[in-house]
Image (tube, grey):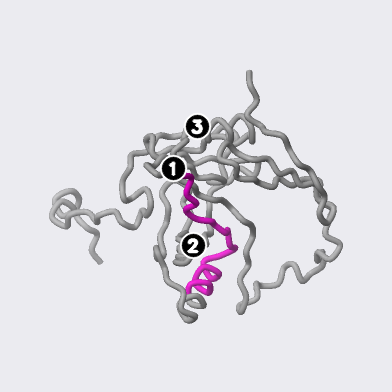
């Protein structure tokens, strides 16, 4: 079998081994490992203190989203070369993929009619809904624009917001409560609906139908 992992360029920064492969569309990606323990990390009682209510706790860079005309070639690179695994897919339009940390979405690949690979968005995982709302309010106060306001994604369950970078034409997502998959997770094929992007878009039940199905409890 032919390996889809290209020639690597390795280097060390701050004690971490960084590997920079390039995908079929000549984008380079750093993969790090063997990082040294942070000697400044707190191990005392302060770890149990409540979060700083004036700051934002960003836990990690969670994922990136791409649209590509070379969809299946890119899939082979990420699966066979980089070791990503399928979490779920939306018909043949989009694949949600995960890596070793088992977060549902570590990479989003979309099959779209584009002339060249197009970067869609970058997502940061934060600690709480408070962090989401602080980022939201700070951004709006300082002139940032939302492309998508508060929502919950169906596949991962994550709650988030999207700010648009109009100059570069891509989005920055901030989310929390993003699912981590069990080892025995079985990928699902999901229908392309508005509710996939935001479960809160679901229509509420018809009051007439509800009234005919079961009587409501009364005090």
Q: Is residue 37 left or right of residue 67?
A: right
Q: Earlier in the sequence, mark 2 or mark 3?
A: 2
Residue situated in front as seen by the camera: 10 or 37? 10
Q: Using the numbered discs, state the Cα–Cα distance from disc 1 to disc 3 in whole angstroms.
A: 20 Å
| Quadrant of res 206 | bottom left
Q: Residues within 10 Å of mark 3 (few under 14, many from 20)?
A: few
Q: Earlier in the sequence, mark 2 or mark 1?
A: 1
**Which mark lies nearer to you, 2 or 3?**
2
Query: What residue is disc 3 on?
Result: 186
Query: What residue is disc 2 on?
Result: 168
Q: Are marks 1 and 3 in contact (CB under 8 Å)?
A: no
SS of the residue at dot 2?
A: loop
Q: Using the numbered discs, state the Cα–Cα distance from disc 2 to disc 3 in whole angstroms.
A: 36 Å
**Which mark lies nearer to you, 1 or 3?**
1
In percent of width and height, residue 178 lies at 53, 52
Badge number at residue 47: none
Q: Using the numbered discs, state the Cα–Cα distance from disc 2 to disc 1 in whole angstroms.
A: 19 Å
Question: What residue lies at 58% left-to-right and 38% top-to-bottom?
Answer: 182
Question: What residue lies at 49% left-to-right and 55% top-to-bottom?
Answer: 121
Q: Residue furthest front?
A: 115
In percent of width and height, residue 87 lies at 51, 38
Residue situated in front as seen by the camera: 21 or 98? 21
Q: Residues within 10 Å of mark 1 (few under 14, many from 20)?
A: many
Range of the magenta residues? Answer: 116-136
In percent of width and height, residue 79 lies at 58, 32
SS of the residue at dot 1?
A: strand
> Where 23 falls versus 15 (above or below)?
above
**Which mark lies nearer to you, 2 or 1?**
2
Q: In which quadrant is the N terminus drawn?
A: top right
Badge number at residue 110: 1
Q: Residues within 10 Å of mark 2 (few under 14, many from 20)?
A: few
């Amino acid at each position: 079998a032919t390996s889809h992992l290209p020639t690597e360029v390795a280097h060390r920064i701050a004690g971490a081994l960084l590997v920079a492969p390039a995908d079929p569309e000549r984008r380079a990606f750093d993969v790090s490992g063997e990082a040294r323990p942070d000697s400044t990390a707190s191990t005392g009682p302060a770890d149990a203190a409540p979060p700083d209510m004036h700051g934002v706790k960003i836990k990690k860079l969670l994922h990136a989203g791409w649209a590509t005309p070379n969809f299946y070639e890119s899939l082979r690179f990420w699966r066979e070369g980089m070791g990503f695994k399928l979490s779920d897919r939306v018909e043949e339009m989009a694949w949600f993929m995960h890596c070793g940390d088992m977060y549902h979405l570590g990479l989003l690949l979309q099959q779209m009619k584009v002339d060249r690979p197009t970067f869609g968005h970058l997502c940061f995982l934060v600690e709480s809904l408070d962090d989401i709302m602080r980022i939201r309010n700070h951004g709006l106060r300082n002139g940032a624009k939302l492309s998508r306001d508060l929502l919950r994604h169906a596949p991962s369950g994550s709650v988030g917001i999207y700010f648009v970078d109009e100059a570069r034409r891509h989005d920055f997502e901030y989310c929390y409560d993003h699912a981590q998959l069990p080892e025995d997770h079985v990928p699902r094929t999901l229908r392309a609906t508005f509710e996939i992007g935001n479960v809160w878009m679901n229509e509420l039940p018809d009051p007439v139908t509800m009234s005919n199905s079961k009587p409501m409890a009364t005090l």
